Amino acid sequence: MKRSFLFPLFSLLISASAFADDSEPKLKVEPMGRVLIDGALYASPQKEEFPDGMAITEARIGAKMRYGKWHAFLDVAYSYAKIGLRNMWLEYNINDRNRVRFGNFIQPFGLESTYTNSLKCTFEQPMAGALFTPGIQLGVMYGYTAPSVWIGTGFHVESSALSNAMNAPLFNQQGYGILGRVVWRKAPTEGPIFQLGISGEFATPQRRLEDNEDVHDGFSISTNFPTKVVQKSAVGTTVENSKNLFKFSPEFIIAKDRLALEGQYFFQTISRRKNLCNYNSQSGYVSLRGLLTKSGYTYSSDLAALARPNPGSLECVLTYNYLTLSDSGAGIFGGRANNANVTLNYYINPYVTARLNYTFTHTWNREGYDPITMNGFQARIMVLF
């Protein structure tokens, strides 16, 4: 493991020890893990791009730690023959409603930032969300939870922070982002669930390589086709000569008994230097969820999202995505995509979930690429422990 990974880890452990109080309960450690086993069959005019196959697409192992008001989490993932550190954070619960988190984690931005793979109802994260929802970043977050309101706000540096932390010149050049999510909800123990939210982010340009030199004047935006057996880029572009980025995203959830509707819209604009036109992009998705068993949907107040269905539940999810990275006014054509899919989820028990999925994706209008159509039939066993 690189020294740049060990430094933040040791810092978190030292911080936890420094603030420990002998009067608080003993340290509690709970090991955790996750394994995803996927199989896929593809039908596409570009069949050579999507070979059928099976794969262990992800395996994670880690631990949750608790010491009084201090919580911590650490996990390591094996994916596509690579091992890397994922979540690594330390959290202090000020009281029942307020908390602060430090470390490497997904910052609060929209519904998809709350749903981990173990909680997602779709086979893969909706393409619209994968395009604009920030990934795991090094930073700090403040969270506030009340019966009718959920607020999360954070500060993070760019993804290269961990790998460049030991290199002072690069560390000083890193881009940063300030973001937040505000949710209003009506989610009684019994009865209809209704939620409205909005997220926003401001960010500065990130690191990219140009002629083997580090340059901080661009944003790279991309997402893959919604399958893990084959990793293939669907849409993507790099916006150079950038000054800053701003994006916002409204979201909603409506649920009653065994039916639920949720969705999110994303709009992003990047201001540019040298009198170049601003670059605008957008995406959105909507999911219709239905439980085919007797139990209805419940709500997670801590996540500000629907909770995982009860063990033994069978769920059907219909999802539509639209996304565009092409802006003719800015002269940038990163591509457009339509995606529709249906997923059947069987929550066998608290530790095992089986998924079946059909997905249709069509991409076009990407400079340097021909249109691509993918039909995918996928299956997954997910094991949590």
Image (tube, grey):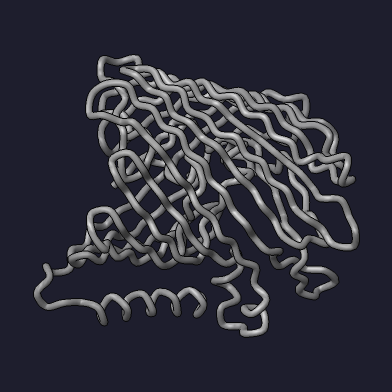
Q: Residue furthest bottom?
A: 168
Residue 87 falls left or right of residue 228: left
- Count how many numbered circles sit on residues in the image: 0
The picture quadrant where one finds residue 81 is bottom right
x 50%, y 43%: residue:
110
x 80%, y 48%: residue:
279
The percent position of residue 149, horizontal first and vertical second, equals 36, 42
Q: Residue furthest left?
A: 23
Q: Is residue 276 above or below residue 187?
A: below
- Judge by depth and name the residue closer to the eye, 84 or 280: 280
- Judge by depth and name the residue closer to the eye, 262 or 374: 262
x 51%, y 63%: residue:
155
The picture quadrant where one finds residue 245 is bottom right
The percent position of residue 321, horizontal first and vertical second, equals 62, 29
Residue 93 falls left or right of residue 174: left
The percent position of residue 286, horizontal first and vertical second, equals 55, 26
Q: Is residue 156 above or below residue 254?
A: below
The percent position of residue 354, horizontal first and vertical second, equals 38, 29
Residue 273 falls left or right of residue 166: right
The picture quadrant where one finds residue 293 is top left
Q: Is residue 9 above or below residue 51?
A: below
x 51%, y 57%: residue:
136
